[in-house]
Image (tube, coloured by chain):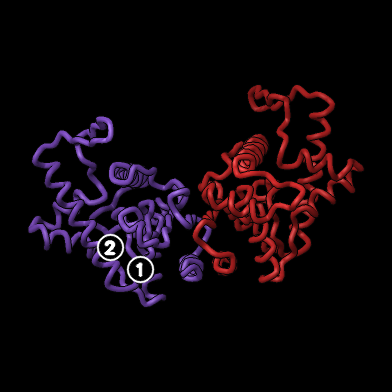
Chain colours: A red, B purple
C-alpha cells in the first residue's frame, strides 16, 4: 500500500512549502493544485470555477437526517458542487493508489482515511503568518497588514466550513490529526526532517 | 543557553515514556518525579503531600481583579500551595540553567517560556490510552476499563485546571505548543526521532 501524507494548513503558515519540500526529500509525488486541474479536466468545468469551490464554498443545502436515511434539498449549483466533490474523491483515491504521495488540502485526510495517511496539520501565530504573506505577495497584490490579516481569517474560515461540511469534524482540531506543527518557531528544514522521521 | 524540551501529556498517552526515551537519545537530563522530590527537600513537606498538589490541585481562592491591581483571598492551605508553586518555579529554572534537559509536566512550558523551550504536547485516542493503562497497571491496581477511563478523565481534568490556574491558558490547546503528537498511530521510536529532529 502506498504511503500517504496529508497536509492541512492554515493560510500563510507555510504548509504548502512544507508539503513540497517533504515530497522532494522523500521522493514522493506531490499533489496540490494538480487536484484542481484534474477535476477541471474530468468535469469540463473551468479550473477557475473548480478552484472557487474546492476547499472554499460549502454547499447551501441542509442535510436532513431521517432515521438512517440521508436526504438533501438541492439546487442545480449544489448538484454541481456535489459532482465536483465526488470527482475530487475519485481523483484523490486514484492518486493515492498510484504511488507514495504528499497531498495538500482538499479534505484528503478525511477522504483517504481508510488508507491511514499520516495526517499533518500546519499552523502558526497570526504575526508569523502575516509576516510570511507580506514577504510572499507579488507587486500586483500589495495588501497591507490589516488586509492580509482579514484575508487569512476569511480563507481559514472557508476551509473550516468546507471541512466541517464534508467530514463533520472540526478543522484544526488536534484529535483529527497525527501531528500538529506550529511553524512560528520551527524552521522549514527541521519541520521536514521531523515529519520524514514518521514515515 | 541550554536546550529545553517540555513535554505536556494526557494521562496514558505515553508522554512520560516518550520524554524519557528522548532524553536518553539526545543525552539530555530528564526531570519528572525528580521535581517533586526537589520541592519536598526544599519545603520540608512530604513528597506525598507535594505530589498531591503539583499538577493536581488548583488553589481554592478566587483571584479578584480590581483595575490593574490583583488581590487574593487566601487561607493557610492556599499560602502553602503558593509557596510550593514558587519553589517549583525556582527549581525548574535551576534545572533549565544547569544543562540541556527534557522536563515532563509541571507547567514547565509556561514557567520556562522565556527560555524558549520546544513545547511538546502528547495525546492519544481514549481507546489507545485505556489499552496502554491496562497493560501497564500493577497487580495491586487491577482497575477495569470503565474505572481506567474515569481515572484518565479525572487526572486530565486536574491537569487542565492546574494549568489554567497558573498560566491562564487552555491545557492541550495547540496554540500553546510547538508540536502536538498523537500517539494512537505513531510508534515510540518514530515519535522520539521526530522530536529529536527539531532540536
Determine which residue is flagged by label 1: B20
Q: Position of residue B17 (x, y in %)?
A: 37, 64
Chain letter for mark 2: B
**Relative height, residue B8 to residue A48 (above, below):** below
Q: Is residue B147 left or right of residue B22?
A: left
For label 2, the crowd category at 10 Å Cα-Cα, with few meaning under 14, some 14 to 19 and many 20 or more, is some
Residue name at image x 81 percent, y 44 percent: A87
- Tell me, for residue B32, which label it has, or none: 2
Chain letter for mark 1: B
- Tell me, for residue A126, which label it has, or none: none
Residue name at image x 25 percent, y 53 percent: B141
Q: Are marks 1 and 2 in contact (CB under 8 Å)?
A: yes
Q: Position of residue B100 (x, y in %)?
A: 34, 72
**Relative height, residue A79 to residue A143 (above, below):** above
**Relative height, residue B51 to residue A100 (above, below):** above
Q: Is residue B121 left or right of residue A122?
A: left
Q: Please report whichever mark, 1 or 2, sits nearer to the chain's N-terminal start.
A: 1
Residue most extreme to the right: A44
Residue name at image x 10 percent, y 37 percent: B75
**Relative height, residue B10 to residue A150 (above, below):** below
* Residue B70 visible to the viewer: yes
Please state which of residues B123 and B145 is positioned toward the viewer in this rendering: B123
Q: Position of residue B151 (x, y in %)?
A: 31, 45
Viewport quadrant of the N terminus of chain B? bottom left
* Residue A163 visible to the viewer: no
Residue B15 location, quadrant: bottom left
Residue name at image x 49 percent, y 67 percent: B198
Residue B70 location, quadrant: top left
What is the total number of numbered labels drawn onto the structure image? 2
Amino acid at each position: 500500500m502506498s504511503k500517504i501524507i496529508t497536509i492541512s494548513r492554515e493560510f500563510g503558515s507555510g504548509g504548502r512549502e512544507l508539503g513540497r519540500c517533504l515530497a522532494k526529500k522523500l521522493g514522493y509525488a506531490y499533489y496540490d493544485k494538480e487536484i484542481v486541474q484534474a477535476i477541471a479536466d474530468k468535469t469540463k468545468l473551468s479550473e477557475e470555477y473548480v478552484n472557487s469551490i474546492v476547499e472554499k464554498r460549502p454547499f447551501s443545502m441542509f442535510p436532513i437526517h431521517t432515521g438512517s436515511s440521508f436526504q438533501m434539498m438541492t439546487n442545480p449549483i449544489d448538484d454541481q458542487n456535489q459532482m465536483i466533490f465526488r470527482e475530487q474523491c475519485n481523483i484523490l483515491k486514484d492518486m493515492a493508489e498510484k504511488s507514495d504521495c504528499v497531498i495538500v488540502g482538499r479534505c484528503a485526510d478525511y477522504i483517504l482515511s481508510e488508507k491511514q495517511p499520516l495526517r499533518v496539520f500546519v499552523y502558526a501565530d497570526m504575526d508569523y503568518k502575516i509576516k510570511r504573506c507580506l514577504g510572499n505577495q507579488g507587486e500586483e497584490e500589495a495588501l497591507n497588514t490589516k488586509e492580509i490579516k482579514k484575508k487569512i481569517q476569511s480563507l481559514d474560515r472557508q476551509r473550516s466550513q468546507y471541512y466541517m461540511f464534508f467530514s463533520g469534524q472540526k478543522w484544526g482540531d488536534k484529535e483529527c490529526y497525527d501531528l500538529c506543527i506550529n511553524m512560528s518557531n520551527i524552521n522549514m528544514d527541521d519541520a521536514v526532517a521531523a515529519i520524514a522521521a514518521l514515515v
